Amino acid sequence: MDLIEQLRASRIVPVVRVATADEALELAGRCVRARLKTIEFTATTAGWAEAVRAARAEWPELVVGAGTLRSRQDAQCAVEAGAQFLVSPLPAPAVRSVAEWHGLGFIEGGFTPAELAAATALGPAKLFPAHVGGPAYLRSLLAVLPGAAIMPTGGVRLDDAAQWLAAGAVAVGLGSDLTADGDLTERVQRVERALSAVGDA
């Protein structure tokens, strides 16, 4: 799997940060019904590795990643659970070494131009926390890092997703603004309508 191409095709990546594995799986089911292609379970969820394992078994069409990984131990746990890609919110050489050893894609986090330049030299990067700089900051980064695959995450609002993608994001990581109770499918459709409007402008 080419992770950058998967992100580009997905455009919206739900970041699942909930209390329990059962809640994470319920939310994953809603994401599948909304026809989302990629999901990130975070290691802050109790039983997150079991959620990764169960999601892989239940929805083989869904590309499942594990995020908020900071240590070699967490990364190895994610691999053993069947994660198809790994994510960290910050520079994490230990996580990268595990990903590379197992032939998995890694989305390494960063905020400064230097951190993101280092990460995107090796693959996709996660701009975190994205809300601090907004889409204008991403445009500035891409002016000096042309072609870099950057996924903004952290405080990204649903209604701003189209602006981020228009600014050059390879995909957007959306948390509670997407995954809260209610009609997740309608929210995804709202983003898609906004993307169409941006494309037509």
Image (tube, rainbow, N blue to C red):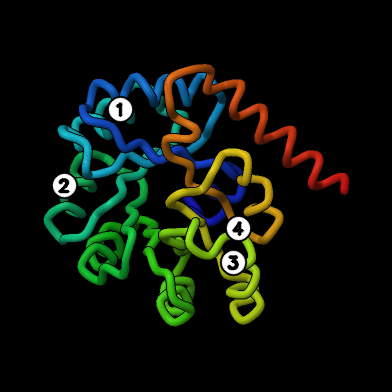
C-alpha distance separating marks 2 and 3: 32 Å
Mark before the other along the chain sequence, 2 or 1? 1
Residue under label 3 = 138
- Expressed as whole percent of the image width and height from the top left, the position of residue 15 reads 40, 40
C-alpha distance separating marks 4 and 2: 29 Å
Q: Between residues 83 and 12, which one lies in front from this camera angle?
A: 12
Numbered label attached to residue 169: 4
Kind of element beneath mark 4: loop
Residue under label 1 = 24
* Residue 23 falls left or right of residue 141: left
Mark before the other along the chain sequence, 4 or 2? 2
Kind of element beneath mark 3: helix
Residue under label 2 = 77
Kind of element beneath mark 2: helix
C-alpha distance separating marks 1 and 3: 30 Å
Which amino acid, mark 1? Ala
Question: In the orientation shown, which residue stands out farthest toward the right?
Answer: 201
